[in-house]
Amino acid sequence: MTGSAQTPAIELRGLVKRFGGKTVLDGMDLTAMAGDSVAVIGASGCGKSVSFKCALGLLPMDAGSVRFAGTPRDELPSSGSQALMRRSGVLFQGNALFDSLPIWENVAFALFHTGPMRRAEAYELAITKLAEVGLDERAANLYPPELSGGMQKRAAIARAVAADPEFLFFDEPTSGLDPVTAATIDRLIEDCVTRLRATTVTITHDLASVRKIANRVAMLHGGRIVWEGPVSELDRSGSAHVEQFVRGRTDGSSTGGPPP
Amino acid sequence: MRSWPNPLAPIGRVVLEFLAATGRVALFTAEALWAAARPPYFMRHAGRQFLEIGYYSLPIVGLTAIFTGMVLALQSYTGFSRFAAESAIPSVLVVSLTRELGPVLTALMVAGRVSASIAAETGTMRVTEQIDALVTLSANPLQYLVAPRLIAGVLALPPLVLVADVIGTMGGFLISVGKLGFEPGIFLNRCLESLQTLDVVSGLVKAAVFGFLIVLMGSYHGFHSEGGARGVGRATTNAVMSASALILIANYLITEAFFSR
């Protein structure tokens, strides 16, 4: 683990992101200490995925800063940025598996396409990582469209954790899955986070998921974090926005906004 | 007081948009070239793309070339017979094919097949976050997706054009000998006598440039596609249209460079 006990592992400060005239993030702050598993919750269209992409540098920010273990991401040269990515694992909402590569190559991509590992070695490691998420060697040699949604999600988790990252980002890991598969994915994420002791940020609106995989929760509303606290306090947060979200009430201000 | 819209404003907007688009393409080209010039080199990927662009284009290129050669022989005969100049048909055929028709028609056919395919694949990768995933796996998308294709495009088009030249001449030969009454030996001799190294070299240089443009346009439009399936469709159309237009413009410029006095 990098950084001292006081230095946050992941720190977002004053993130601002606009699309045309619409401000999606309006000074968002988020801090995750080393080993934390923080869930960012919020209504659909409130900017959760946008904050995720800004944090990873996939979308340019209009203002604000992102620090990993105290290092400002924007000040890194491209080689430093790639090195930072090597320390991060990312699970995308739609999995983003490469259609043109078999599952094992997807999992081992960062190890032998852009890393030092040889093909045969990477294959063995991919098979091990896939076994950890419950996929066998037969699935390893299939292509992503040949797998079910749940199996693709497992493969995408295996890819995210393949290089034993320090920072993990999960974007809506259980969206579109049935409750049983979603619970399985939650358990897999929990196992990975515990085993790797990685600092994890999960974007989700699935409260069942939040209670299983996170130790802290942050509520995004109106482009800012309006409440942050331990997951145990989610039901007695004292925040109207959180309460409305948790109870699933349709009256109030925490209903979803239009997507950017 | 009511103010009238400036009639020049729409023209200005179009010009500004054109200049901005040119700038974006130039920047993308520079970044792609820089990505191709430095390691890591994805040679396995480049080899696969060489097969995809070159080998799998052979049927359509061969078909186009043989019928072009046949039509060229027929049309030349129609025109030249009025002046009793039928003997010039082999020369006209082989020079037109190697200098112009071989490279341009091959490139246009490959643009339709390859540029569209690259734009659709890259565009789908963009809208399904696969390009973002490449970044998070510490890969440079330009190095992984564009550079191998650029190398494959530049290397695959010249041999394709050579094949088109030979098959096109064969088509002209078949019509000239089978239908127009030429002696096979005389026809081939005339072809060889008329053909100069510069004719072939200029055609191959054109082919390499066209290969670059085809891949560049497919990649550029794919990379910048947005808005789901509709956006990918638009990127595919734009890739084929812009690649075709650039091929014709580049053809003029290279012809000017090689043959203008």
Image (tube, coloured by chain):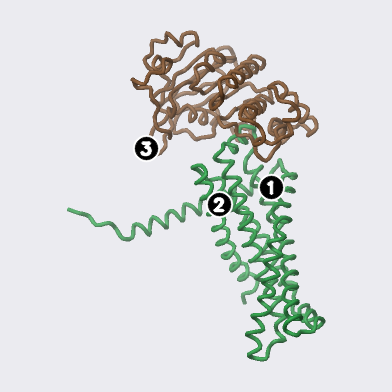
Which of the chains bears the disc numbered 1? B
Q: Secondary structure at mark 2?
A: helix
Give the Cα distance between marks 2 and 3.
Answer: 29 Å
Task: Check disc 1 and give the amino acid type.
Answer: Pro
**Left or right position of A78 against A15:** right
Residue A112 seen in this snapshot: yes
The answer to whether the residues at label 1 and label 3 have Cβ atoms under 8 Å apart is no
Q: Position of residue A112 (x, y in %)?
A: 73, 33
Give the Cα distance between marks 1 and 3.
Answer: 39 Å
B106 is higher (above) or lower (below) than B87:
above
Number of on-image labels: 3
Residue A7 seen in this snapshot: no
Rendered-image quadrant of the C terminus of chain A: top left
Q: Which chain is assigned green? A: B
Q: Quadrant of residue B111?
A: bottom right
Q: Position of residue A191 (x, y in %)?
A: 65, 16
Question: Badge 3, how many Cα within 10 Å: few under 14, some, many 20+?
Answer: few
Q: Which residue is mark 3?
A: A21
B169 is higher (above) or lower (below) than A258:
below
State the residue in front, A124 or B194.
A124
Among numbered discs 2 and 1, the one appearing first in the sequence = 1
Can you tell which mark lies on residue B236?
2
Give the Cα distance between marks 2 and 1.
Answer: 20 Å
Which of the chains bears the disc numbered 2? B
Q: Which residue is mark 1?
A: B148
**Left or right position of A109 against A190:** right
Q: Position of residue A256 (x, y in %)?
A: 40, 27
Q: Which chain is assigned brown? A: A
Question: Badge 1, how many Cα within 10 Å: few under 14, some, many 20+?
Answer: many
Q: Position of residue A57 (x, y in %)?
A: 54, 32
